[in-house]
Amino acid sequence: MASKKNNRVGSALAGMLNTVSYILLIVGISLIISTFCIVVANDVLALVKDGGEVTLELTEDSTPSEVGKLLKEKSAISYPWAFRLFSKLKHVESYEAGSYTLDRSMDYNQMIAALKNSESVASVVRVTIPEGYTMKEICALLVEKNVVREEAFWKVANNYDFAHFMLKDVPMVENRLEGYLFPDTYEFYANSDRVDDEAHAVDVINKMLNNFVKKYTKAMRNLTEANGMTIADVVKVASLVEKEAKMADERTTIAGVIYNRLESSSFPFLQIDASILYVTGHKEALTAEDLQIDSPYNLYKSQGLPPTAICNPGVSCMMAAIQPENHKYYYYVAKPDGSHIFSRTQKEHERAVADVAAGKYD
């Protein structure tokens, strides 16, 4: 009889423990759900959120999912899925292309209203950056088109730590982005008093850097590595070729001259005029005084390549720098039509210079 009684007591205790465990489980789950709901509600309703303006640029009509991801990247929201769901509840299927100024303190409803407000949309500016433009020329063009403000452009260009792969070994020096602002036709959003100038400049420059990443293909990267080169050196050589070669069919030949000199102990200096002109800003031929300037860009006095590229080259010049023509030329001189006479020896070069000076090719 005692044994049966003990069994009944044990069963009762076990049942109580199971009930308590079940209740604790339910309470625990409820706490987790309630905590989750509170956290999400704070994000959706902006109950406790830090403020701060953020510019959202949509280059094409975007889905709520895409916009939610962008808002997450801008630290404006924490839960893109919740933004997508809220947009659906508001019967919003897409957001129009444009530039929008939001505040991180906004709740989802306010953000959606701002994104649907046509007054928040900035005008689109189409800008063509020619191959061979320098950063100064690009900045002047963007300022002229009201895309960026000059001070913001230079502050960002020289100090912002862009994370693109080709910049990982490029030191944070003045004009460090020279050569990487890929020349192309872009659609930018005009600057306005509503946006953060520096944040806007980051977006503009980032667009050009992203294009460089796209245009410097995997095949080009493989060739660069196979040739024992760095992208930085390719860009520097390509920029020299871009400025020196007026004829497309001479690009690889001029690149070959540059490499021949770099690899020969008999020619310690590249002696490329365009690099000095990058510093002087002159459009005309160099003067005797120019040749004596104390600058690492003076390749008549400084050995090797310049510290940065001297312009922003196109793909054809970069390919010439990656795959130069194999020849024995060490000199070239320009003829009046922009083409060049290439020479192997100093004597040949002097004769070519004399012929050009005498008007033989006029």
Image: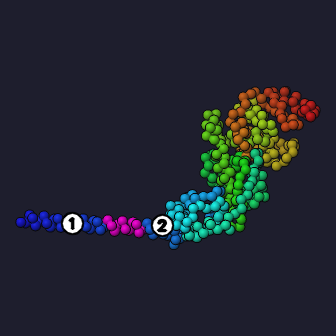
The residue under the point 72% across, 36% down is 320
Q: Secondary structure at mark 1?
A: helix
The residue under the point 43% across, 66% down is 36
Question: Looking at this rendering, what residue extends furthest in the bottom direction?
Answer: 47
Asked if labels 2 and 1 touch by Cβ distance under 8 angstroms, the answer is no
Task: Look at the magenta stretch and give its main secondary structure.
Answer: helix
Q: Which residues are magenta?
A: 25-35
The residue under the point 83% across, 33% down is 340
Q: Which residue is mark 2?
A: 40
Percent position of residue 277, x then y: 81, 45
Q: Quadrant of residue 152?
A: bottom right
Q: Which residue is mark 1?
A: 15
On residue 277, which mark appears? none
CA separation, marks 1 and 2?
A: 37 Å
Q: Amino acid at mark 1?
A: Gly
Q: Amino acid at mark 2?
A: Val
Question: Looking at this rendering, what residue extends furthest in the right direction?
Answer: 358
Considering the image in quadrants, where does the C terminus appear? top right
| Horizontal side of residue 30 vs 6, given as left or right | right
Percent position of residue 358, x then y: 93, 32
**Is residue 168 rendered magenta in the image?**
no
